[in-house]
Image: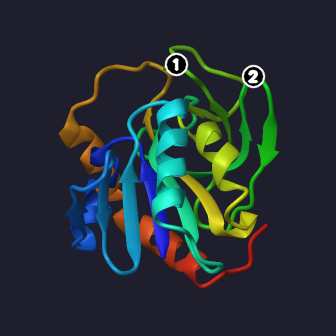
Amino acid sequence: MTYILSAFETEARALIQSYGLQKDVHHPFKIFYSEEILIIISGMGQEKAKEAIEYLLLNFPNKTDDIFINLGICAGQKEFAVGTLLQIKQLQDEEESHHLITCNEYIQAVSCFSSFVPLDRPTTTDIAEMEAMGIYRVIHTYFPRKQISFLKIVSDNFNPIKFSKAFIIGLFQNKLSQIQDHITLLQKGQKCQ
């Protein structure tokens, strides 16, 4: 099984449509699924992401060969164009830092600051977002590190505005084949660093 967490349905819409996932309305979180993929929508922020992961693992226990992907948007330094797909190799917040394993040489690996609030100024990391650390604190005890991946698409260069749903859906639709290739690499257990 491939588990995917996104903060917003718009971030997962391209995958939901591509894989023809069904919506399960019997949960406090939006869940879309097939026999091979389950997507949970957490809402924005570390605390909501943490709650969604805990709910997911309690109600849909993972097996040893399952993989987990966090898929969402981020703010990126000016050298990262809006629409760039990135994978996180270094995750930090105010309290801790973690080195993550990367498995796809075709997606640039970057450092990420996981914030509690939207940032309107650059950090010392390549990108910033608001869910990854809340997710990682829970997920790393359930999945081997080589089966966890954080994929982010740059939505802005630290000038957050309210994005339209169509804009976010378009970002992910444009990178759908790369995201699907990444999922396949993880499923096959490709060599990771």
- What is the quadrant of residue 179 in the picture? bottom left
Q: Give the numbered dot on residue 94.
A: 2
> Do the residues bearing badges 1 and 2 touch, measured as CB atoms within 8 Å?
no
Q: Quadrant of the C terminus?
A: bottom right
Q: Disc 1 designates what residue? A: 117
Name the residue at 47% across, 66% down: 60
Is residue 52 toward the left or the right of residue 97 in the image? left
* Secondary structure state at the residue bearing disc 2: loop
Looking at the picture, tell me which residue is in the foreground, 135 or 122. Answer: 135
Name the residue at 25% across, 56% down: 26
Looking at the picture, tell me which residue is in the foreground, 135 or 89. Answer: 135
Name the residue at 74% across, 78% down: 191
Looking at the picture, tell me which residue is in the foreground, 136 or 88. Answer: 136
* Secondary structure state at the residue bearing disc 1: loop
Please name the amino acid that badge 1 sits on.
Answer: Val
Question: Dot 1 surroundings within 10 Å: few (below 14), some, or many (20 or more)?
Answer: few
